[in-house]
Image (tube, rainbow, N blue to C red):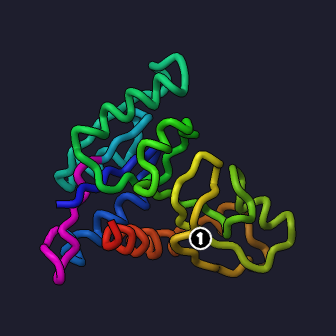
Amino acid sequence: MKNIVILISGAGSNMAAIVRAAEREHWADAPPRGLGARVAAVISNRPDAAGLALAQAAGIATAVVDHRAHPSREAFDTALAAAIEPHAPTLVVLAGFMRILTPGFVARYAGRMLNIHPSLLPAFPGLHTHQRAIDMGCRVAGATVHHVTAELDHGHIAAQAVVPVLPGDTADTLAARVRTQEHLIYPRAVAETLRNL
């Protein structure tokens, strides 16, 4: 069985989309019907992350590694890896995980870690992507699933989705439109990556 470990920091909507796709598409079944894969655990750096309750309700193991309890990024990443490893991950999926990971952590899961970013990378890496797209007068925006590298919001692109930027859009209305596409492309990109691992 290929194990997926999902890292979250908040509501976990992309995590929930992946869990729903795994159930709907019978990922746990052996190929060719399924992928021989399951979501083995959901781990958050925030104890109050709402996504933890969603995962628990789905019968998925959860854990918290509070970044505030660690004196450095390296110490946090060591503790995070210690929480991930018992689940023998084939793939580590960042789904709204709001921590910058150290190069050592990234190297540990090189080629086996995906992230989703709410812009059409390489445009607008980092934060406040929707407002930046509006401020620049972009006609389109979107989301990108990419393989994680030591460089922030960089790495091979696994999937992208494009949405229009409409007159009168705010960062919130644009974010909502992008999020609907995130929930479609992220499960597909996870499944495709699993087929190649």
Near-viewer residue (190 or 88): 88
Residue located at (30% from left, 34% from top): 83
Locate residue 150, reporting x and y percent. Answer: 59, 46
* In this view, 103 is above or below 155: above
Locate residue 32, reporting x and y percent. Answer: 18, 83
Residue located at (31% from left, 73% from top): 195
Residue located at (45% from left, 19% from top): 69
Q: Please tell me whether residue 16 belongs to the stretch shown in magenta.
A: no
Locate residue 56, reporting x and y percent. Answer: 22, 47
Q: Image quadrant of residue 164? A: bottom right
Give the side of residue 129 with respect to residue 49, left or right.
Answer: right
* In this view, 50 is above or below 93: above
Instruction: Quickly name the residue at label 1.
Output: 178
* In this view, 116 is above or below 9: below
Residue located at (58% from left, 77% from top): 161
Q: Residue furthest right?
A: 136
| Quarter of the image where the N terminus is located | bottom left
Q: Which residue lies furthest to the left in this view?
A: 30
Give the side of residue 3 with respect to residue 156, left or right.
Answer: left
Give the side of residue 143 with respect to residue 91, left or right.
Answer: right
Magenta span: predominant SS is loop
Q: Which residue lies furthest to the top in this view?
A: 71
* Badge 1 density bin: few <14, some 14–19, many ≥20, Cα 10 Å: many
Q: Please tell me whether residue 29 belongs to the stretch shown in magenta.
A: yes
Near-viewer residue (144 or 110): 110
Residues drawn in magenta? 28-41
Q: Which amino acid does label 1 sit on?
A: Val
Near-viewer residue (99 or 104): 104
